[in-house]
Image (spheres, rainbow, N blue to C red):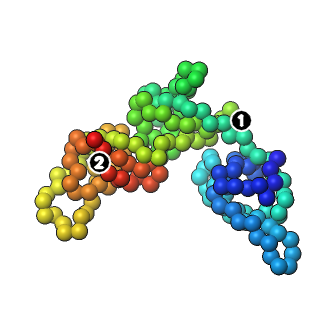
Amino acid sequence: MISSNDFRTGTTIELDGQVWRVIEFLHVKPGKGSAFVRTKLKNVMTGNVNERTFRAGETLPQAVVEKRDMQFVYPQGDNEYVFMDMESYEQEALTRETLGDGAKYLKEGMSVSILKWQERVIGVDLPNTVVLQVVETDPGVKGDTAQGGTKPAKVETGAEVMVPLFITIGEKIKIDTRDNSYLGREN
């Protein structure tokens, strides 16, 4: 059990049979009446964000989320991805729905953190940045723009990223997996 006074960003709680992560919290003590904690919670399984207010000192069950380091081994068919536990060397297949948008950044040999709650996989934490090779993009013509525009580029995993006009096929680029943005070239 955890008190609402002990909420911190990243704390996980069980609410209505689901796991929620505290994104924001604010402890409010009005001049009149009792204190309360205003929170913004994110459902770990669905990604929905919800605002909720708790009385100060209210106790809630804390969700114990286990984080396991695993390595992506290979894709299996169109909808499954096989991961290997780095400690026990056991393999586990996860579906595209479980991985969400993260599936488009997976490269063989990549290390990720698998989040489990009550022996169920509830999510995957990817590295914040990945380095991938551009396999398809339109050629950038000198003098195309005075301001520095962008164009779509397809990387080796199949993800599409908007990149500057000077990027060519075969270059390695760094991508932010949180918002699918181009960060720069990589040697």
Residue projecting furthest to the front: 187
Number of callouts in the render?
2
**Residue furthest out toward the bottom:** 31
The answer, for residue 85, to whether it is visible in the render is yes
Residue 77 in sight: no
In this view, the residue farthest toward the left is: 142
In the picture, the quarter occupied by the C terminus is top left
* Position above or below: 13 against 67: below
Considering every residue shown, the one lying at the far right of the view is 33
Q: Horizontal placement of 125 versus 31: left or right?
A: left
Q: Amino acid at mark 2?
A: Arg
Relative to residue 65, is residue 47 drawn left or right? left
Residue 44 image position (x, y, % from top left): 63, 48
Residue for point 48% across, 33% down: 111
Secondary structure of the residue carrying numbered label 1: loop
Q: Find residue 153 and report its horizontal and vertical position in percent.
A: 28, 50
Viewed as shown, does residue 11 lie left or right of 131?
right
Residue occupying the point 63% across, 57% down: 23
Determine whether 187 is above or below 33 in the image: above
The crowd level at tag 1 (other Cα within 10 Å; few <14, some 14-19, many 20+) is few
| In-front residue for pair 50/109 | 109
Considering the numbered disc 2 on the image, is that residue within a helix, a strand or a loop? strand
The picture places residue 61, in percent across and down from the top left corner, at: 80, 47
What is the CA distance from the residue labelled 1 to the residue labelled 2? 41 Å
Q: Which residue is mark 2?
A: 185
Residue at the image point whose x is 85% and y is 79% from the top: 32
Q: Is residue 42 left or right of residue 178?
A: right
Circle 1 residue: 118
In primary-sequence order, the first of circles 1 and 2 is 1
Question: Residue at the location (18% across, 66% down)?
Answer: 145
